[in-house]
Image (cartoon, grey):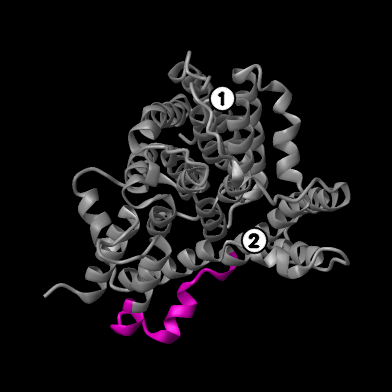
């Protein structure tokens, strides 16, 4: 009879990959949470060990960045960014370039999932009103957010985990990961331009755009306060102060407002994503305690696939990121990286993030864009996403592999 922990793990990860369980109204967060509950209820993870399995510094860092993003969103900053570029809508390629650059930069500082959640509705609205085909721009938003987030430790949830567990220096991470990120972003832009050549205009414009509203108007003071907090936080990340301590302190200061109610900020925290993380930590702990991942790695090494080989790590990370999404993949793979070799951690961060563009389930950012766009009756099919996502991912991973081969990465 198979080990209950292994069975729970397989069912949970299959459910997370598929996004549902037939016959049940469960999303990925619900599936992961049930998996964690099953691990505890079955005794695979004792209750007293469950809390210890959760990497609290990573959760705190992610939570604090969500508070910072909520400040900017309620201050109307995200809406202002898109509206400031609407003058370029008559030049679709320039608007695509500008929106991708903005998404990439903000994702590197505020986490890609948060940026996609804030930008997608505004982007849908201005594109539909202008009569432009929203697909290349929405796919550009997802791709740029994924790619841009690879540059920093705080760019996406898996990088936060990698940075925290590997105790990586913020500046060294940025210095190593920024060059391939910039090249990959440029490639993504040209691939989208080529893919949608002659198809930037929309043949018909939907008559009903009621989903518009209630985004806060731009407030200079509230937005400036959020931007100042972001700059202070980035500066603190270059100091020896623990990142999670810096982040939660800045978030606490932002909550002390005379005009913006803390409840409004807390409502914009993505509790589903935080729950997903906590649940997956417990599920992964359930099989790690039985050394199942270690046995699998030993079996792979017998066939010449060692995780310490950076080229093999790139391939394994890319494959796993598209089987179960990049966050669960990173949770599994960080256990086998050497803390004394930071390049292994950099490669995992880049490859798992770049691979997120391949197919829809590769990253949560993709799913956020698709679900938000659906509210505006914009459908992004698996095939449509793959038409751009596959070449973008292959180009991005090729950039990483070439830099490793040419010696820009570790020898």
Q: Secondary structure at mark 1?
A: loop
- The residues colored magenta run 38-57
Residue that badge 1 annotates: 132
Q: Is residue 88 left or right of residue 151?
A: right
Q: Which residue is drawn at the image coordinates 72% and 28% (left, top)?
A: 85
Q: Please, is residue 103 above or below residue 331 in the view?
A: above
Is residue 112 positioned above or below 50 on the image?
above
Position of the N terminus, as image quadrant, is bottom left
Q: Earlier in the sequence, mark 1 or mark 2?
A: 1
x and y percent of residue 292 in the render? 26, 65
- Quadrant in the rendering for residue 392: top left
Dominant secondary structure of the magenta stretch? helix
Residue drawn at (38%, 53%) of the image: 329
Which of the labelled discs sits on residue 10, or is there none? none
Which image quarter is the C terminus in? top left
Categorize mark 1 by other alpha carbons within 10 Å: few (<14), some (14-19), many (20+): many
Give the labeled residue for mark 2: 268
């Amino acid at each position: 009879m198979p080990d209950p922990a292994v069975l729970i793990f397989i069912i949970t990860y299959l459910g997370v990959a598929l996004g549902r369980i037939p016959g049940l109204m469960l999303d990925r967060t619900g599936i992961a949470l049930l998996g964690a509950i099953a691990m505890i209820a079955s005794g695979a993870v004792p209750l007293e060990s469950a809390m210890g399995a959760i990497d609290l510094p990573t959760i705190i860092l992610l939570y604090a960045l969500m508070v910072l993003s909520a400040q900017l969103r309620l201050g109307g900053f995200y809406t202002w960014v898109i509206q400031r570029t609407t003058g370029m809508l008559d030049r679709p390629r320039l608007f695509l370039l500008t929106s991708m650059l903005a998404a990439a930069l903000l994702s590197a500082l505020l986490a890609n999932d948060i940026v996609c959640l804030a930008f997608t509705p505004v982007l849908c609205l201005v594109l539909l009103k202008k009569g432009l085909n929203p697909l290349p721009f929405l796919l550009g938003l997802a791709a740029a957010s994924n790619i841009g987030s690879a540059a920093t430790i705080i760019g996406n949830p898996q990088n936060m985990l990698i940075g925290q567990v590997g105790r990586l220096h913020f500046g060294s991470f940025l210095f190593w990961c920024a060059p391939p990120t910039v090249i990959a972003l440029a490639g993504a832009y040209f691939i989208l331009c080529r893919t949608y050549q002659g198809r930037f205009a929309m043949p018909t414009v939907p008559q009903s755009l009621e989903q518009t509203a209630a985004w806060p108007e731009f407030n200079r003071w509230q937005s400036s306060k959020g931007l100042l907090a972001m700059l202070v936080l980035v500066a603190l990340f270059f100091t020896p102060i623990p990142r999670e301590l810096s982040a939660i302190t800045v978030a606490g200061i932002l909550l002390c407002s005379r005009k913006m109610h803390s409840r409004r900020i807390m409502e914009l925290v993505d509790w589903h994503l935080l729950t997903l993380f906590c649940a997956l930590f417990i599920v992964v702990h359930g099989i790690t305690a039985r050394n199942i991942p270690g046995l699998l790695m030993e079996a792979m090494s017998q066939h010449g696939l060692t995780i310490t080989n950076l080229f093999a790590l790139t391939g394994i990370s890319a494959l796993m990121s598209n089987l179960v999404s990049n966050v669960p993949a990173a949770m599994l793979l960080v256990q086998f990286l050497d803390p004394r070799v930071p390049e292994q951690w950099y490669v995992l961060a880049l490859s798992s993030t770049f691979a997120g563009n391949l197919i829809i389930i590769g990253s949560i950012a993709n799913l956020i864009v698709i679900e938000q766009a659906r509210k505006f009756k914009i459908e992004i099919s698996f095939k449509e996403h793959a038409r751009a996502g596959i070449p973008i991912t292959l180009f991005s991973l090729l950039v990483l592999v070439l830099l490793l081969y040419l010696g820009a990465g570790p020898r």
